Image: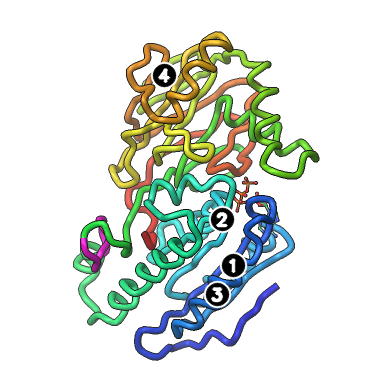
């Protein structure tokens, strides 16, 4: 469903041409209405907004792809990590920046980018980023290398720490079904199993579905033998939880890679060795807080390319289903511009 108030080819000075893609069912519908408020606020600011909502994710992605062919100044997604995934996969290796208003159950990408979760604060953050983007767009055209330099991290055109236009790395993933991109993490262990189980459940309809899936998968916890090729070196490792992270957290704030950076040109391979259920439950809170790095059962390695294979695992990237392992993940430095 498109609510397009005729996005013009050119706009008055300062006004931007924006595409806003909304997931009305993010957070199981609890944040319904947030997208419309974003659109109204941006139109009030004088921007030309192409508002997109669809019956499902695939239709929304197709509509956003069509809208991007018109070369808007930015794509803004309103939703959780799934919607960030939609934006990332449409914008990777383009110059069009991604804006995020986090309204999902999992907002790890927004967390890593320092985007606030509270709606008014998130909107203010987005507006500040758009102001910088307007200023950059209005600036005289410059040679390409100079423009790229000016748009590199930290947030270009803004005081240090303030929202602007940043460049971040992405993970590029290839698997039997094709290629895709992720901003936060590839999940290939316990969290992937929890996601897969929650997705297969019809009830309950709220976020407690993830809690139930987590409890079931904890009861079934068992190590798998992974075949890895890490930066060209093959190894086998037994693990219960294995993640290739670009960002610091997964699963709505679990700080698996507390020292990861979105713009260091590297990924963090996080491996938890086989443990008893009891021990796993004991270390779980430390994983949430990111104070697990010193534990002997936790391995964290900075990597650039990883092949991951293991039996019976459906991989997830940024909370979206990828398909069965094996997958190959490679860091793509500076592959995405973001408003943050
Ligand atoms: N109309 C819709 N538009 C977009 N996505 C939708 C729609 N209806 C359901 N979805 C589902 O929402 C998921 C993405 O949700 P998002 O990440 O934005 O929020 P979330 O509350 O964190 O969701 P989840 O926890 O289920 O990933 C997609 O996997 C998609 O299948």
| Cα gap from disc 1 to disc 4, whole angstroms | 46 Å
Task: Note whether 6 is above or below 233 in the view shown.
Answer: below
Label 4: element kind? strand
Do labels 1 and 3 touch, CB within 8 Å?
yes
What numbered label is drawn on residue 150? Answer: none
Q: Main secondary structure of the magenta part?
A: loop
Q: Which residues are magenta?
A: 151-159
Q: Earlier in the sequence, mark 2 or mark 4?
A: 2
**Are circles 1 and 2 on residues that touch, CB within 8 Å?**
yes
Helix, strand or loop under label 1: helix
Q: Earlier in the sequence, mark 1 or mark 4?
A: 1
Q: Is residue 60 left or right of residue 331?
A: right
The residue indicated by pointer 4 is 234
Disc nearer the start of the sequence (1/2): 1
Residue identified by numbered label 2:
103
Instruction: For marks 2 and 4, give the one nearer the viewer.
Output: 2
**Residue corresponding to mark 3:** 39
Residue wearing tag 1: 35
Across and down, in percent, residue 239 comes to: 51, 16
Of 103 and 132, which appears nearest the observer? 103
Q: Are marks 2 and 3 in contact (CB under 8 Å)?
A: no
């Amino acid at each position: 469903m498109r609510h397009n108030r005729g996005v013009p080819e050119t706009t008055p000075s300062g006004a931007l041409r924006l595409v806003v893609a909304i997931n009305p069912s993010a957070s199981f519908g609890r944040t319904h209405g947030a997208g419309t408020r974003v659109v109204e606020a941006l139109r009030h600011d004088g921007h030309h907004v192409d508002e997109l909502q669809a019956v499902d994710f695939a239709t929304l992605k197709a509509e956003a792809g069509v809208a991007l062919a018109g070369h808007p100044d930015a794509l803004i997604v309103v939703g959780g990590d799934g919607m960030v995934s939609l934006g990332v996969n449409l914008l990777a290796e383009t110059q069009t920046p991604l804006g995020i208003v986090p309204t999902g159950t999992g907002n790890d990408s927004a967390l890593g980018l320092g985007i606030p979760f509270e709606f008014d604060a998130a909107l203010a953050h987005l507006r500040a980023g758009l102001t910088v983007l307007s200023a950059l767009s209005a600036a005289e055209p410059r040679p390409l290398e100079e423009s790229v330099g000016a748009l590199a991290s930290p947030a270009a055109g803004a005081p240090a720490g303030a929202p602007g236009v940043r460049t971040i790395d992405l993970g590029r993933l290839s698997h039997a079904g094709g290629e895709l991109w992720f901003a936060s993490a590839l999940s290939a262990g316990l969290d992937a199993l929890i996601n897969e189980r929650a997705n297969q459940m019809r009830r309950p309809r709220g976020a407690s579905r993830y809690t139930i899936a987590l409890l079931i998968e904890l009861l079934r916890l068992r190590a798998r033998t992974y075949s890895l090729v890490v930066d060209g070196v093959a190894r086998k490792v037994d693990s219960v939880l294995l993640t290739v992270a670009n960002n610091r957290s997964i699963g709505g704030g679990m700080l698996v890679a507390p020292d990861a950076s979105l713009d260091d040109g590297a990924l963090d391979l996080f491996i938890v060795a086989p443990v008893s259920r009891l021990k796993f439950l004991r270390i779980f809170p430390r994983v949430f807080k990111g104070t697990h790095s010193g534990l002997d059962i936790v391995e964290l390695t900075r990597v650039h390319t990883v092949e991951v294979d293991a039996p019976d695992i459906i991989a997830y990237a940024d909370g979206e289903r990828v398909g069965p392992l094996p997958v190959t993940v490679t860091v793509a430095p500076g592959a995405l511009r973001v408003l943050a």
